Amino acid sequence: MDPVSFAYGLGALQGLVLAIILLLIRSGHRTANVIMSVLVIVIALRVLQKLLVHSDYWVDAPALAFTLYPTIFAWGPLLYLYAHTLVGGSLRRAHAVHFLPMVAYFAYLNSGYWQLTRDQQIDLVNYVWSTRTDSAMAARLSEFFPATWTPFIEFHLHSLLFIVQMGVYCVWVIKLLHQHNTRLQRHYSSVDHMNLRWLRTLVHAVLIFLGLLLIFYLIPAIAYDNVDFGSTQTNIQNLFLVVVIYGIGIAAIFQPVILRGIHLGDGQPTSSSDLKVALHRRSFSKDDALSEEVHDQSQQQEKYSRSGLSMEDAQRFHVCLMDIMQKERLYLKNDLTLTDLADAAGLSTHQVSQVINSQMNQNFFSFVNSYRIQYAKSLLAAPKTRDTPIVELAFEVGFQSKSAFYEAFKRVTEMTPTQYKKSVSE
């Protein structure tokens, strides 16, 4: 067995093993893991198809040559539904519409193909997976292959559609994760283990790869119509995307439970005792604050009257929350939640959230971490604590990692803790 066949065979086998692990693993993300296992299986079938093409198997069984081709159009929908269920969404029958392109493409490919004779199928398969430089073969094929196949064969339409579809779903996933992170920041002061940053990073990698595939592979293939499907470059391109998606599947196995105590909507969390979280890299954002400018007095009064909270009560609760944060220093609790603060203030989570949003122009996440940064600044400026190691300082003010502290501190002060310490000591 040559190295390429070995790589494809190993990839297909690893996909099967990974899918089984995802199905058997005990996790709070049971539905999400099932969807991911299906995605991994579909990808494994694609890798298997590459192996069969590389080994010329379809010459012996041409009738099934294009049965696995349409499965690439299930990658995007399955990735999106995985992210959708991972953040707490539920599956509905309406989601089946995402797979219509795959079904339509299957019918498009095979309806005319299965009507050909076996010899015609073999000729067509040999041409599709060749460098397509044999003009005599092309002329012979034009006499019998379905006319609707011209875009598929000559212009690589299926590859273009896959890149566009996968790109759209990747953008949807990124948007979904952004919305999820926004919801988390309404309830938690530290969200690193819940914000699915790993998934966003891998999806960005897929988008970059799709762009490179379009620029350096598909456009030249359409322009020059001379692509060697067995070349090393082509094999590397195929394997790279598979590795990225497999990476998502492997990361899914180690993803901690993040759904307990938070809902997709604006409802309040029901529990936080089982969540072990670290600070998100984004602390208080000046842009977020500017985007939530205080409305005029009449607009605020109308808003509070609709919610049952008067302007006077909102202002009083505002003072109460600031007093509690300063006196009890709740921000030092690295897993402080909206529920914790509401309990300490004797208010409902809805009241606390509304006051923080409307009176302070912040969400809960930025509200708590602004106190942490201010406390860190005082420690960095004080002679007794100025030489404290940064990692110790980060833990002392409520962060759970040095890197998170650095990122949050720089976002608020526009300088690193070291630079700030130097500036106040001069």
Image (cartoon, rainbow, N blue to C red):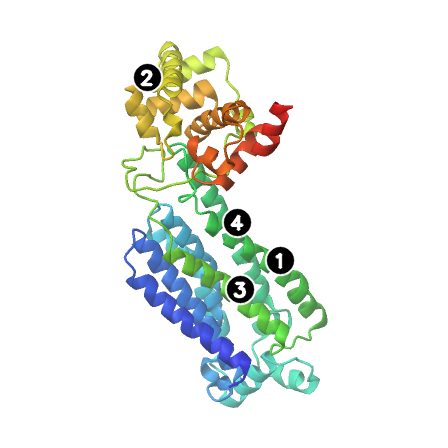
Give neighbour class at mark 4: few <14, some 14-19, many 20+ (Cα, 10 Å). Answer: some
**Distance from label 4 to label 1 (Cα)?**
13 Å
Residue 161, compared with residue 358, is above or below; it is below
Q: Is residue 389 visible?
A: yes
Horizontal placement of 343 versus 185: left or right?
left
Residue 229 marker = none
**Distance from label 2 to label 4 (Cα)?**
38 Å
**Eye-nearest disc, 2 or 3:** 3
Residue 6, compared with residue 400, is above or below; it is below
Residue lying furthest right: 224
Q: Nearer the viewer, residue 203 or 396?
A: 396
**Distance from label 4 to label 3 (Cα)?**
17 Å
Q: Residue, x 54% and y 62% (percent of image)? A: 162
Quick one: SS at disc 1?
helix
Residue designated by label 3: 241
**Distance from label 1 to label 3 (Cα)?**
12 Å
Q: Residue, x 63% and y 77% (percent of image)? A: 231
Question: In the image, what residue type sits under mark 1?
Answer: Gly
Give neighbour class at mark 2: few <14, some 14-19, many 20+ (Cα, 10 Å). Answer: few
Residue designated by label 4: 171
Question: In the image, what residue type sits under mark 2?
Answer: Gly
Residue designated by label 2: 308
**Distance from label 2 to label 3 (Cα)?**
53 Å
**Comes first in the chain, label 1 or label 3:** 1
How far from the left and from the top, in percent, is residue 136? 68, 87
**Comes first in the chain, label 2 or label 4:** 4
Question: In the image, what residue type sits under mark 4?
Answer: Val
**Distance from label 1 to label 2 (Cα)?**
51 Å
Quick one: SS at disc 4?
helix
Residue designated by label 1: 211
**Comes first in the chain, label 1 or label 2:** 1
Horizontal placement of 400 versus 230: left or right?
left
